[in-house]
Amino acid sequence: MRIANSFRSRLEYSRFMGVGFRRSALLVAVVLGFGLLVSACGSGGEPGRQDAESATGTERSERTERQASIMQQQVDDSSEEKPELAATELGEIDFGHREGLPFIRNVIGDPEAPVLIIEYSDFQ
Amino acid sequence: MIAEAIRTGLARYEYRHFIIFGAASEFAAMATECAGDQGAWWEFHDAYLLKGLARTFTRAGSIELARDEGLDVAQFTKCIDNKEHADRILQMQQQAIADGVSGTPTFRINGQPGARSLNGILDQVRDAAEAAEASEAQEGG
């Protein structure tokens, strides 16, 4: 049983390595192709280079905008995952003897007030 | 006097959990924090502490209270079942121990140990408020 498992895992390993090799070869081909393309653009005349630089600048700008948009989306997504951040806005107590006082969760009063009174307590 | 200091923006008051009565208290603290996610922190605080609603120290009781308060019960239940604020409560407990708290209620005024009597605490708050006002006036003038 153990030997069979060992054989199976070795078989899976070799299959994995085969796929990995094919992927690596494909990646090398893509990189080489891209390199040749860049070198061909670089060897053109002056106007061609200016066009290429201008296009590259535009692409860079678009890419930066896309990245900023993705980062903002990630920030938005991560804040949705944290429910404790949901109630961090200043509210106003509308009942009891504290009515009218501003609060954020367990803190009553202006968050910037210079005097901080802390009470440690237990509900029982 | 404390309420006045809070209303005028001189002081703020923060309630922190310090669990000394075991699992039921810990549960009440968790339920309060979960209610706080939906803006009902003080409703739960008052139900537990001021109204002494012992029935709400259970899961069923706290869910009933959440329903009474018009909270999203599914979100609240998920929060208490997953103990989503366990870290926050533990952090308060650790800070209390670091501050030398050994019983409840214990007050601290601007980081200094609070007096034992209410009058003593009021004096401390008054002194701290006056010091803050003087400091503000000095910076302004």
Image (cartoon, grey):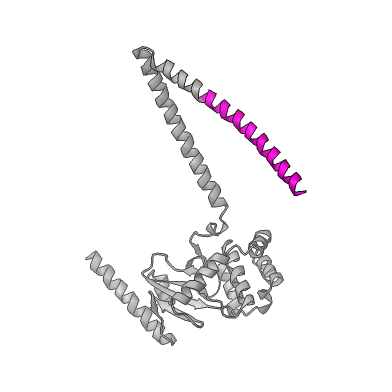
Residue B40 visible? The answer is no
B33 sits to left or right of B72: left
Furthest-right residue in this view: A1
Q: Can residue A110 be seen by looking at this rendering?
A: yes
Between A119 and B9, the one lying in front of the other is A119
Residues drawn in magenta: A1-30
Q: Is residue B67 left or right of residue A110?
A: right
Depicted A8 relative to depicted B36: above or below: above
Residue A86: where, in percent of width, then height?
55, 57
Instruction: From the top left corner, tell me how far across and down residue A32 is, in percent.
Output: 49, 22
Query: Would you say residue A46 sits in the magenta stretch?
Result: no
Q: Quick check: B131 left or right of A42?
A: left
Front one among A25 and B61: A25
| Residue positioned 39% across, 17% down in the render | A42
- Vertical placement of residue A34 versus A4, above or below: above
Q: Is residue A20 magenta?
A: yes
Side (left or right) of B72 relative to B1 = right
Query: In this view, which residue lies farthest toward the top?
Result: A45
Which residue: 56% across, 78% down? A122
Count of numbered badges drawn on the protein: 0
> Is A114 above or below relative to A34?
below
Percent across and percent down for residue B114 are 41, 81
Residue A2 position within the rendered picture, expressed as x and y whole percent measured from the top left:
74, 49
Image quarter in which the C terminus of chain A is found? bottom right
- The image quadrant of residue A65 is top left
The residue lying furthest to the front in this view is: A3
